[in-house]
Amino acid sequence: MTTVKVRFRRSAIAGKKGSLFYSLVHNRKSKQITTKYKVFPFEWNEEAQVMVYRFGRRNKELREIQVMIKKDLEVIENIIEEFENDGDYSLDKVVAQFLDKSFSMSFFIFMDEEIRRLTNSDSLGTARNYRRARSSFSKYLENKDIDLISVTEELAGDYELWLRRKKVSRNTASFYMRILRSVYNKAVERHLVSQNYPFRKVYTGIEHTRKRALPEETIMRLNECDLSSSRTLSYAKDLFLFSFYTRGMSFVDMAYLRKEDIKEGLISYTRRKTGHSMSIRLERCMQEIIERYTGLVKESDYVFPLVTSDDPGKAYSQYQTALTYYNKQLKRLSSILELEVPLTSYVARHSWATMARNRNVPIAVISAGMGHTSEMTTEIYLASVDPAVIDDANRKLIAGIAKKKIRNFEVLGTEKL
């Protein structure tokens, strides 16, 4: 039988923090494991072996230490249990195995390696998202690094609460959590940390956002409006309609679309987000938009004058600049047309999916047409349904059952019900 206790060793200098260590006793022999955790004497309850929380500024750090101590004790107990199942053992073996298991790479060092890997593989958008999540998590940790084993359920929960207090939207917080979870899971795959599912209780879903789809009549109005007096607005309109005509082609795929991708009446390209191969029949309306800009891309391999460089870093920078300017012009266009749903680079994609759904195109077909990895993703796009569409569907559904009552309702009106 081995006992394990957490002990406190005072500093030789009065007023300084002391050190916590683990005391192991087995067969009347004892062994100590010194930890990196340092606290003041009044912050440690020796009898209960727990932290004493008094000052607000220190409480966060003390809670983190308490969590890490709990984690260490679980590791030690698991090691002891394994040895006891095998038979006789010594404390030296327990300590040696604990020190081996407790070694953990820095979370941010590992995350930075992932960011470099993504950058080197030209996954620049994903690398940018990783940097955004890293920046937020680092701010929460007050620019301190932590070990991979310190990423716990409690830490993830506290980070989620911090984001909420900072008024970060639920979808943005979920976006950060999913990235951090991905980094942690990759560390698990490389056997750098044991899988403890630290993100299982935080929100990692996608909350339905406000309606982003335009009604069919608005698309027609946009198509017919004359913007010849403004080259920039006309260009933004053309890109928006091209995206809609091509089943919601994303702006990044339009920006990187090359002339060689269009041949034999087909637009063939690979979605940069998912890697899916896409093939779209080239319709006359698409060809007309492309031809309007051929004079601007004579010396370029690209279809549109959005990206010009073949250097991945420079091209991505050009894409980001073009996207920002594009959304700015769409905002102007929304104001001019007094649109209820403001135009953005995503609206064309949502509009195509919604219009296809309203025309009874099967979800599976819409999903394939948009290059989604699953129909669940398509369902998110179609989550916001016009109540009038639902009412119309309901009326058709019940018409055969309550036909007489529906006619009476139409004659009498609601005031007599």
Image: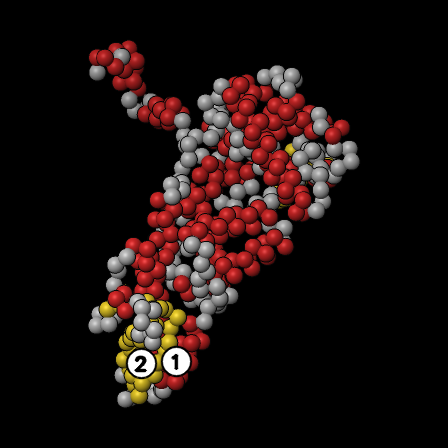
Q: Nearer the viewer, residue 91 or 364?
A: 91
Instruction: Say which residue label 1 marks.
Output: 95
Q: Nearer the viewer, residue 373 or 207?
A: 207
- Which part of the image, by quadrant, shows the C terminus? top left
Q: Position of residue 39 (x, y in %)?
A: 32, 67
Give the left or right position of residue 304, taking residue 27 as reference: right
Q: Is residue 194 above or below residue 311?
A: below
Q: Position of residue 235 (x, y in %)?
A: 64, 26
> Residue placed at 31% from the left, 81% from the top?
24
Q: Nearer the viewer, residue 37 or 200?
A: 37
* Mark 2 or mark 1, earlier in chain: 2
- Residue furthest out toward the front: 14
> Residue placed at 36% from the left, 48% from the top?
162
Q: CA distance from mark 2 to mark 1?
A: 9 Å
Q: Position of residue 167 (x, y in %)?
A: 38, 41
Q: Under tag 1, what secondary structure?
A: helix
Image quadrant assignment for residue 45: bottom left
Crowding near pointer 1: few (<14 within 10 Å), some, many (20+)? some
Instruction: Say which residue label 2 marks.
Output: 24
Give the left or right position of residue 312, taking residue 61 as reference: right
Q: Is residue 415 above or below residue 262?
A: above
Which amino acid type is shown beneath numbered disc 2? Leu
> Residue placed at 42% from the left, 79% from the top?
97
Residue 185 shows in this picture: no
Q: Nearer the viewer, residue 20 or 266?
A: 20
> Residue placed at 44% from the left, 62% from the top?
146
- Which part of the image, by quadrant, shows the N terminus? bottom left
Which amino acid type is shown beneath numbered disc 1? Val
Q: Are marks 2 and 1 in contact (CB under 8 Å)?
A: yes
| Colour convention of the picture | secondary structure
Q: Position of residue 201 (x, y in %)?
A: 34, 53
